[in-house]
Amino acid sequence: MRHSMKRCHAAIIISVFLLGSATGWSQTKNTSVQAQLHEEIHFFALLVGSNLPGARQTPLRYAHDDVEKIKNVLVEIGKYSKEHIIQLIDPEADTLATSLDKLKNQMAQLPKGAQSRFLFYYSGHAKSSALTLGSDSLSLKELRSALTSIPASQKIVILDACQSGGFSRIKGVQPAADFSHNSYALLQTKGTAVLASSSAEELSQESEELKGSIFTHNLVTGMRGAADADENGRVSIFEAYDYAYDQTLLATAETRIGKQHVTLETDLKGTGETVLTWPEASSARVTLPKGMQGTITIYDEKTHTIHGEIHKAKGSAVTLAFPPGAYAVLVAHNGKGQTCPVQLTKDHTTTPKENTCRTVSLKTATAKHDSTSDNSPRSYRFKPFLEVQAGIQFVSKGAFIHRLERVGLQSDEFDSNQRISYLEVSTGLSFNRYISAGLLYSTLDRMEFFGITQLNQQTTEINYTWVAHRFNGQFRLRYPMWHDRVVPHLFVDIGAGVVNDKYSYKSYNYMSGRPRFTSTQRMWGPVLGGGLGVTVRLYRILHLTSQLKYIYAPILKNLYDEKRNDGGWILTAGLQLRY
């Protein structure tokens, strides 16, 4: 698995506020009571994902995806209904505050004595003591005040937040501690657990294959059942921590950035078991048998989206909860790989059958299940592409053709609004997500002019044709959008063009034959161009692409030293294969 640094210090904090007697919760250590408690709880959630950077911060890529993962696991096995979840993408601070008030009002309308849980999730940038919402921000003190006013029996806060810039000064006095420390200090209250994705001195990392932070992925996988150590069908905060610590450390142990240690600070005294999810309630489950071991990846067979990845030891079975559907289980161990298809159905637990598994090359298998093989920074590096486009070239007359018309030559090429067909083939390499370069060949304009003149009973038939081509280098600047499914790009072409022209005539009268004369020549000249385009990913390596470009190719020249631009405006569409 490839990993990249988030370019910032990051922390994921789970804070659980248990409000004691004011809420009517019974603070008992009897886990059986806690197991039944969720049946009577009303669940509400506000999920916020912001990729927008603040000052001296770079845009994030996976905050939106992390929010979607959290929402899915909460709806599927966390007892949350979609109607009670508000999802905000790149909001301003006022929008966030308004949404908090909306959920606050909803909870205030619950029957008296009703139990409720409120979960707040944020994924994005942060400063030392505030969430960064683009050019806006929300301080942890403001967040704590807003959370305190929410009339929920239990409150869970999860912050997947990156801090850029290390330390900052508070009114010029002392440097502030990092975000991880401040989040715990400023949100702390009685009955609080703080789960951080890394220690204060470490950098949190993202996985390109997983399209999200390594910690969030492990947390969600644990919540789906991988963290259920006592196999009671429920995942508690402590189980989630143990699992996330081991898996995150293992996943980052050999990366160039370094190890990442999950930390936990807790003050959950006398609160019993705090359950995050109930995998036992899922309608579809997959059990990885005792004998299965290695790095195990579960992905959707149709979309190749990864839903879970765990490092499993031999000797214990693991059950994970997913929505019904067609999945594949990829097992990598000791340099060997196997993939096993599984069909998860409602109200059923499925175990991969050994006789359906097939041996695969790990390199091929990784590419197969890598849903980001075409939209992540490292996966773009030095990746080849092949592109074929066809379209319409809009040609113009100019001084060159006007000269031909004045001497009596004409062409049928201009009978159809001065448009001719165009073909382009290009190949190149993507150096990263934003830059690619390559070589291309394309046709340019091709014309045929003819005319008949009569002088002193002498008839002359004239035919003049030319065909132009170009061979260019192309440089593209790309800006991936919507998980790289749509990629607008700006490009510049530079190179050379060639024109082959042929001039012929035949003369005759009523007494003589028909002498012929033919002259051919080849002309070279510079070609410059550029334009805008967009590429839409259809399926894995197959893309649809379209461009609007202008080509300047003053190659063809006549005896009067008049040059013709063999380019012009060109509109194309075609297909791209990107490996």
Image (cartoon, rainbow, N blue to C red):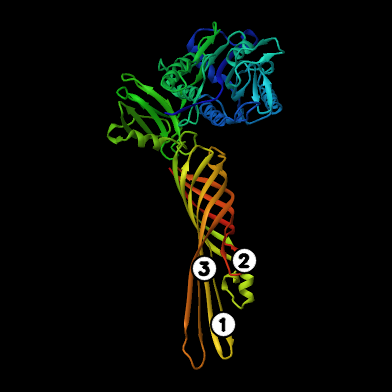
Q: In the rendered image, which residue does mark 1 sit on?
A: 452
Density class for disc 2 (Cα within 10 Å; few <14, some 14-19, many ≥20) is: some
Q: Quadrant of residue 161?
A: top right
Furthest residue in direction left, as rendered: 355
Inter-mark Cα distance, 3 to 1: 19 Å
Q: Quadrant of the N terminus?
A: top left
Residue visible at 66% across and 30% down?
91
199 w.r.t. 423: above or below: above
Q: In the rendered image, which residue does mark 3 sit on?
A: 466
Q: Mark 3 or mark 1, which has the lower sequence index?
A: 1
Q: Secondary structure at mark 3?
A: strand
Density class for disc 3 (Cα within 10 Å; few <14, some 14-19, many ≥20) is: some
Q: In the rendered image, which residue does mark 2 sit on?
A: 562
Q: Nearer the viewer, residue 512 or 232?
A: 512
Percent of width and height locating residue 141 = 68, 15
Residue visible at 56% across and 91% down?
457
Q: Nearer the viewer, residue 497 or 225?
A: 497
Tell me, yes or no, if residue 147 can be seen here: no
Residues tagged 1 and 2 counted as in contact (Cβ below 8 A): no
Residue visible at 57% across and 45% down?
489
Q: Amino acid at mark 1?
A: Ile
Tell me, yes or no, if residue 165 can be seen here: yes
Q: Mark 1 or mark 2, which has the lower sequence index?
A: 1
Percent of width and height locating residue 172 = 71, 12
Residues tagged 3 and 2 counted as in contact (Cβ below 8 A): no
Residues tagged 3 and 1 counted as in contact (Cβ below 8 A): no
Q: Amino acid at mark 2?
A: Glu
Q: Is residue 91 left or right of residue 333?
A: right
Q: Secondary structure at mark 1?
A: strand
Q: Amino acid at mark 3?
A: Trp
